[in-house]
Amino acid sequence: MRLRGRKGIRESLESQPELVVLDAAPHKGKWREFFGNDNPIYVELGMGKGRFISNMSARYPHINFIGVDMYDELIRRASEKARVIWEEKGVESPPNLALLRANIEGIEDMFAPGELERIHLNFSDPWPKSKHTRRRLTHSRFVEKYIELLNERGEIHFKTDSLSLFEFSLNSFADMELIMRNISLHLHKDGPREDLVFTEYEMKFMEKGQNIYRVEAVIGAEALRKHREAKQATAIKEAAEANDAAADNDSDDESATE
């Protein structure tokens, strides 16, 4: 991917140290110092023009967000988008957002073990050729790094329009014995999921009625505990509803025989 950036783009990025990070190394293990709080940190790997990460930061002000991409021009566009979104809220600069220019290949040099709580992978390059399998962001070599960087509440949220990449990703997670939940083969089948924030690509695909595939991988021990508790509560509720339905049927049968 080649992007033609504006003249003076690097100077523009360097003039925004409160928002744009051009070198992650000094912040590894210290991202909470950058944000000035102990709130959870969510990261989007491959943020593109930044619509998703910017809107997430505005919707969830008590979470810190980091958007990662390797192109200056995308960082610039994302910074403009983020400022517009926050200015609508009367805030000049996003207080809980960082835009990091970095290559995801070196993610272990950007964050310390346990520093992250969620990783978002949205419409990543599917790298369809078999010889490029290792470049896919859900390949085990990347997932192993994610697991190391996520804390006890850690999760991976993955969305794609590529069925082949989705199948590959499900198998990759399964091979690593990860618990998966909320698997969807057509995320917006019943209309736009307003509880979710959309990316630029996602909005285009939705307009065309194209399938969006989504899954969440549960990583951290605390996240797993809550997932199991939720499953147990759902099972208990379903059993109670089934018993109530059976009792109603018995009552109806008795009434019919009287």
Image: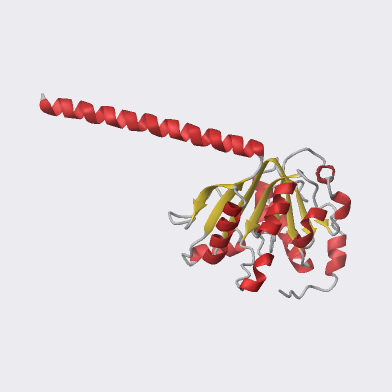
In this picture the colour scheme is secondary structure
Residue located 40% across and 34% down the image: 238
Percent position (x, y) of residue 71? 77, 67
Percent position (x, y) of residue 39? 74, 39
Percent position (x, y) of residue 212? 52, 60
Observer-nearest of 17 and 39: 39
Residue located 17% across and 29% down the image: 253
Q: Which quadrant, please, contains the C terminus?
A: top left
Percent position (x, y) of residue 223? 63, 39
Q: Quadrant of residue 172?
A: bottom right
Observer-nearest of 226 and 48: 226
User: Residue 180, can we see it?
Assistant: yes
User: Residue 193, can we see it?
Assistant: no
* Location of residue 156 with respect to 123 vertically, above or below: above
Q: Which quadrant, please, contains the N terminus?
A: bottom right
- In the displayed image of the protein, which residue is found farthest to the top? 258
Left/right of residue 34 with respect to residue 151 in the rendered view: right
Left/right of residue 142 with respect to residue 130 in the rendered view: right
Observer-nearest of 14 and 34: 34
- In the displayed image of the protein, which residue is found farthest to the left? 258
Residue located 78% across and 51% down the image: 93
* Location of residue 65 with respect to 253 vertically, above or below: below
Left/right of residue 23 with respect to residue 60 in the rendered view: right
Residue located 79% across and 73% down the image: 6
